[in-house]
Amino acid sequence: MKCDDVQSLLIDGCGAGNAAARREAMEHLVECESCRDAQLAAGMLRAERGRPIPPPPPGALERAIAAAAAAIAWALLVPGYTPTIPELEAATTPQVTLALYEPHDVNIAVDTPSPLADAEIRVVLTGAIELDGFANQRELRWRTNLDAGANQLTLPIIATGTGGGQLLVEVHHGQKRRTFVVDVRA
């Protein structure tokens, strides 16, 4: 079963009477973290029948937000692009594994065909990670000039807990935006 079929069946409620399809969709959820996160997020927004909603697994909402941000970034950069669940699932999020409380440089390469004057860089940290030298700061922003070609941004990340987290870097220039996401494991 494809991700968009799972979304239609379990989240949107289409085909709710088909027990075989629901069973197949539930089996898909066992294998697909992206669909599990989407189902959890939809359930939290819907709060079906007033029942208590179980807490999300660590990092689930952050991953769902990052996937949505990546889709929005592509939609802004590529005219006519419409993101769908299968396209999001095909893109893999880079991962880095860190030892607790030991800084590790994470490099982000921003490739641009022409120089970008006064581009804004935004770094967002979620979960149990922080930027070395910026304890307890979850978001940083600054402006800089980017050269044509590859520009490297090196961020010294520290894992502050076993839950890990996620690093999101956005580069804004005029109406264009590019988003980079890295999962950090501890």
Image (cartoon, rainbow, N blue to C red):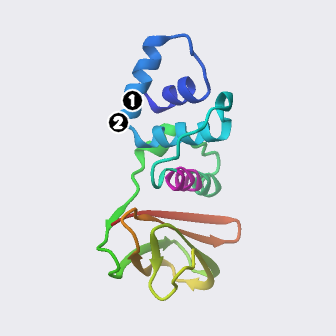
Magenta: predominant secondary structure element? helix
- Vertical side of 110 occupied by 39: above or below: above
Q: Residue at x 41, y 42 (%)?
A: 33
Calculate the distance from the C-alpha at mark 1 to the C-alpha at mark 2.
5 Å
Amino acid type of the residue tagged 2 in the rendering: Glu
Q: Which residue is mark 2?
A: 31
Q: Which residue is mark 1?
A: 28
Q: Is residue 186 left or right of residue 90?
A: left
Amino acid type of the residue tagged 1 in the rendering: His
Which quarter of the figure is the N terminus placed in? top left
In-front residue for pair 100/70:
100
Residue farthest along the bottom direction in this orientation: 133
Residue 43 seen from this side: yes
* SS of the residue under disc 2: helix
Q: Residues within 10 Å of mark 2 (few under 14, many from 20)?
A: few
Q: Position of residue 65 (x, y in %)?
A: 57, 53
- Vertical side of 12 occupied by 83: above or below: below
In-front residue for pair 44/65:
44
Residue 150 seen from this side: no
Q: Residue at x 62, y 83 (%)?
A: 142
Q: What residue span does the magenta drawing correspond to?
A: 61-70
- Vertical side of 46 occupied by 93: above or below: below
Q: Which mark, by number, is residue 64?
A: none
Q: Residue at x 53, y 56 (%)?
A: 62
Q: Is residue 114 left or right of residue 130?
A: right
Q: Residues within 10 Å of mark 1 (few under 14, many from 20)?
A: some
User: Is 68 within the magenta?
Assistant: yes
Q: Quadrant of residue 100?
A: bottom left
> Pointer 1 and pointer 2: residues touching (CB < 8 Å)?
yes
Q: Position of residue 151 (x, y in %)?
A: 46, 79
Q: Quadrant of residue 140?
A: bottom right
Q: Position of residue 171 (x, y in %)?
A: 58, 71
